[in-house]
Image: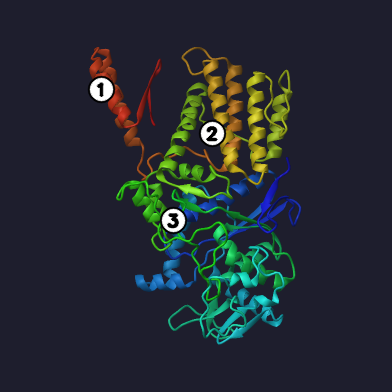
């Protein structure tokens, strides 16, 4: 099926049609870098990194932008608390953010623009809005006049009178309308400031993203992404000021990912990093979101590991670093898989138990990779898989040409020659995977198909007894390699199984553990040789308690976690 994307603006799935044929411009709102990144900061980048991977696979030339907000009230306050400059704090926290993105396999971002490097362009846009009577200066600040924008609220589906419900407006507010939001803010003594026609100050939050996205992607680009909590006020205000300034459509598709939440339903990481920017939207949240200060499952005893981690993650002020709260327990690849296990528009229920379930599922893939290496004498990770759909169709056509029969799948899948029934099933799995991705980037459905594909390959190995000491048929090994190549092709779209996983989440080398386990295996082998079965059984039982499984094979004993 052709790719269809759910557009928050229209509340419908629409055929994907780009501004420029063959090209995609994609912008994702990035972090305010005043503290270490927590798990919630990883959700958007992982999702939209996967979106870019699939669009690239389909043949699009994608430019992916994530901004860095490096000037803000929270940055100023935190820098004052730490006794360092705002610039130094921003650099430190940006490095932490980049380190976490790298760990999560988010390496497809083309530009990371910094707000402080685009202040001049922001002033120019503000001046244009003033000249068109969409904005007005007020006591050193500049505000956008929402009443001048006839369709203000169209993204969040709110009307001006509805926007004011539940908001707090200061009694001495001089703004023309309580919902008017800041484009430029007068700086206090000691705060970062730039000279401007309206006095020394700094840009408001919303204007930053409008300017940086348009500078790198054009006045109209294809995809604007972000968390659901950003739909209002941030994205609503971005859209209003951008389209008022240019008279053009700002973004063709608005994609909003669901929020990370604790299993109790409270959002992990608190509300988004920025609130209000002196506008009247403080306290207003988009439908379906929950504002929380702390999150707790309630079914965990106080002080438990689960409760401690959830408490660390809950509330934006107390969110703990993803490195210490999550990566210390599970490898980043497991966490990435966990984030993609749900459709991007759905909320993601966070708990260590849920990530642990994903980890157990992934062990079946890692065992398959080890089995394949024993059978074929080749690492799964060294397989050369097609990077684009066009390349895949060419490869599979060439393979089919060399087979007695050439089963052609909907998406140009692998041939049915050699072992027709097996490869036909592989092709069907591939079709269903791509159909899921074509249906609004349904990674949850795609992940499910990947597990089915793994199971089908494992059944083929067992049926043909390929993982044995017997002589193996070359044709069956080639067939297995073709199936594993499809697995690698599809996994690459999700950004997983790109390199061997480092299983010790705290970063220690696994070499020592491997040597120690070999010693235990050797001792057990000696016990069995001397018929000391009680010792051999005790070793196996104690290892099972540690969730380490021994596999006795004709060629020797292997071990694995889980």
Q: Dot 1, crowdedness within 10 Å: few (<14), some or many (≥20)?
A: few
Return the mark for residue 538. Answer: 1
Q: How far apart are marks 3 and 2 (CA)?
A: 33 Å
- Name the quadrant of the C terminus: top left
Q: How far apart are marks 1 and 2 (CA)?
A: 38 Å
Q: Depth check: 204 or 93 in front?
A: 204
Which residue sits furthest right? 21
Q: Position of residue 399 (x, y in %)?
A: 69, 26
- Judge whether 189 appears above or below 97 on screen: below
Task: Please report whichever mark, 1 or 2, sits nearer to the chain's N-terminal start.
Answer: 2
Give above or below for 220 relative to 207. Answer: above
1 vs 2, front mark: 1
Q: Residue at position x 50%, y 58% from top?
A: 290
Binning the other alpha carbons within 10 Å of mark 3 as few (below 14), some (14 to 19) or many (20 upward) gives many
282 sits to left or right of 508: right
**Disc 3 element:** loop
Q: Where is residue 355 in the image (x, y as percent from the top left)?
A: 44, 42
Q: Mark 2 points at which residue?
A: 382
Display coloring: rainbow
Q: Residue 38 carries which label?
A: 3
Q: Is residue 272 above or below residue 13?
A: below
In the picture shown, does residue 505 fall above or below 536? Answer: below
């Amino acid at each position: 099926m052709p790719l269809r994307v759910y557009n928050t603006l229209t509340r419908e799935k629409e055929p994907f049609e780009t501004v420029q044929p063959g090209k995609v411009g994609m912008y994702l709102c990035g972090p305010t870098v005043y503290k270490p990144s927590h798990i919630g900061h990883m959700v958007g980048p992982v999702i939209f990194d996967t979106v870019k991977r699939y669009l690239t696979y389909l043949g699009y030339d994608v430019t992916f932008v994530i901004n860095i907000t490096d000037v803000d009230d929270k940055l100023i306050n935190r820098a004052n608390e730490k006794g360092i400059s705002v610039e130094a704090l921003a650099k430190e926290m940006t490095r932490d953010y980049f380190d976490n993105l790298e760990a999560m396999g988010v390496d497809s971002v083309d530009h990371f623009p910094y707000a402080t490097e685009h202040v001049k362009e922001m002033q120019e846009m503000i001046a244009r809005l003033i000249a068109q009577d969409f904005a007005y200066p007020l006591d050193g600040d500049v505000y956008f006049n929402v009443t001048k924008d006839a369709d203000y609220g169209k993204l969040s589906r709110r009307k001006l009178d509805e926007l004011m419900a539940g908001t707090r407006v200061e009694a001495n507010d001089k703004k023309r309308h309580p919902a008017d939001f800041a484009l430029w803010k007068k700086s206090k003594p000691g705060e970062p400031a730039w000279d401007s026609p309206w006095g020394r100050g700094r840009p408001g939050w919303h204007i930053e993203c409008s300017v940086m996205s348009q500078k790198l992607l054009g006045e109209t680009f294809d995809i604007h992404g972000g968390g659901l909590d950003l739909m209002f006020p941030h994205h609503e205000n971005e859209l209003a000021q951008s389209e008022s300034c240019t008279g053009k459509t700002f973004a063709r598709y608005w994609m909003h990912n669901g929020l990370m939440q604790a299993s109790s339903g409270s959002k992990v990481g608190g509300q988004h990093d920025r609130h209000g920017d002196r506008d009247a939207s403080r306290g207003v949240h988009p439908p379906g979101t929950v504002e929380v200060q702390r999150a707790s499952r309630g079914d965990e005893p106080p002080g438990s590991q689960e409760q401690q981690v959830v408490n660390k993650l809950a509330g934006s002020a107390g969110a703990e670093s993803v490195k210490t709260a999550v990566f210390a327990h599970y490898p980043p690849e497991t966490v990435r898989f966990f984030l993609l296990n749900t459709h991007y528009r759905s909320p993601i229920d966070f708990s260590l138990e849920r990530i642990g379930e994903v980890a157990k599922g992934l062990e079946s893939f890692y065992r398959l990779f080890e089995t394949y290496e024993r059978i074929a004498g080749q690492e799964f990770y060294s397989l050369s898989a097609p990077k684009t759909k066009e390349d895949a169709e060419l490869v599979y056509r060439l393979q089919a040409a060399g087979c007695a029969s050439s089963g052609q799948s909907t998406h140009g899948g692998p041939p049915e020659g050699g072992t027709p029934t097996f490869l036909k099933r592989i092709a069907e799995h591939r079709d269903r995977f791509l159909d899921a991705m074509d249906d609004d980037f349904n990674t949850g459905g795609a992940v499910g198909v990947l597990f089915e594909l793994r199971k089908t390959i494992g059944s083929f190995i067992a049926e043909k007894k390929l993982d044995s000491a017997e002589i193996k048929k070359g044709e069956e090994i080639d067939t297995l390699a073709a199936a594993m190549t499809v697995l690698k092709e599809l996994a690459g779209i999700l950004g997983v199984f790109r390199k061997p996983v480092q299983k010790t989440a705290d970063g220690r080398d696994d070499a020592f553990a491997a040597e120690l386990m070999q010693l235990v295996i050797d001792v057990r082998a000696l016990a069995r040789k001397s018929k000391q079965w009680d010792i051999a059984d005790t070793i196996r039982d104690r290892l099972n308690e540690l969730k380490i499984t021994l596999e006795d094979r004709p060629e020797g004993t292997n071990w694995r976690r889980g």
